[in-house]
Amino acid sequence: MVDSTRYSRQMLFAPIQESGQEKLTKSSVLVVGAGALGTVICNHLVRAGIGKVRLIDRDYVELSNLQRQMLFDEEDTKKAMPKAIAAKNKLEKMNSSVSIEAIVGNVTIENINELVKDIDVVLDGTDNFSTRYLLNDICFKHNIPFSYGGVVSSRGMTAFFIPQETPCLRCITNEGTDNGQTCETVGVISPAVDMISSLQVTETLKFLTGNKNNLRNTLKTVDIWFNQQYDMKLSSPDPSCSTCQKNEYPALQRTAQDRETVLCGRDTVQIHQKSNMDLENWEEQLAKVAIVQRTPFLLKATFNEVISLVIFKDGRVLVQGTEDPVQARIWYDRYIGS
């Protein structure tokens, strides 16, 4: 039953009303990434009364996140809390009636099918296009709408893709042609994040409440500092698209994920080679050569003023202090090995 007191103002909005609110409470969404975009997305969705939010993120909270990642605070940084867990803790205090599933981990070919199971919309809170293409392909394979968004500097882009009705992300972007700008190299301001993620959620709410006729149907680009805005209409799909036209889904066909992944704006390379790691055991080993800090979720080993290794239970290791996969692999092999 809909809580008419909690959602009264939202239900007074003519396009939603009680019938729309009931649809929201029965909906399930997947949010990939609990960083800048993901925290704003989750905040809006949970306050709006989405029935279930499944959230996955591979990272933990650091001080530099607090400028724009709205669900975290200084206590989370002191505890080196995984972002997914920290976000869940905050979200449950906002709305205890929403089911929130937090997953600390990486989105891969191996787990993507399980992640989208029983999901009505997938929302992009990621920081790299390799993951976005994976989400795009799984959504179009399983007929799930995909709410895309990305932000850097003071500008961002967003679009809402619906299988069999709109083109897909591959139709309007070229894989491998990223301009290389990241939050680390050109910075980012929080209002730009808020705007793009809010647009992502708005289109999602339109879809879930049955207001498809009000969907924007464009790839929107905005720069809120230099006062620029552009809408490119989502017209016909690219006839040669390997995802939505040929049904080849290339991101799902790769035999293995890249083992070295450079993380956007983090001066960090992720290496995921092992399936699991015993944090207590690694603490004992690395304490001999590094300053170590272990939490229930991760182990951080600091070797010098530059390089640190952050080890997660699921086998992921973040090599912090470099964006060079070769150098990251040297440090990994030196202390973790094969």
Image (cartoon, helix red, strand yellow):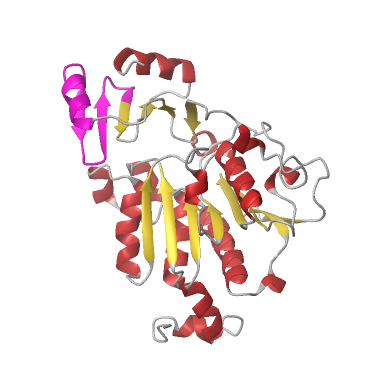
* Residue 208 located within the stretch drawn in magenta: no
Task: Name the foreground residue: 292 vs 255.
Answer: 255
Q: Quadrant of residue 130?
A: top right
Looking at the image, residue 315 lies above or below residue 56: above
The image shows a total of numbered marks equal to 0
* Residue 287 located within the stretch drawn in magenta: yes
Q: Quadrant of residue 16?
A: bottom right
Rendered residue at 16%/17% (across/down): 288
Q: Quadrant of residue 311?
A: top left
Looking at the image, residue 140 lies above or below residue 10: above
Rendered residue at 27%/19% (across/down): 304
Q: Is residue 153 left or right of 229 when viewed as pictured? A: left
Q: Is residue 229 visible?
A: no
Rendered residue at 81%/45% (across/down): 238
Task: Name the foreground residue: 11 vs 76.
Answer: 11
Instruction: Give percent across and percent down for residue 294.
Output: 20, 35
Which quarter of the rendering shows the N terminus? Answer: bottom left
Give the magenta-colored segment's residue range: 279-308
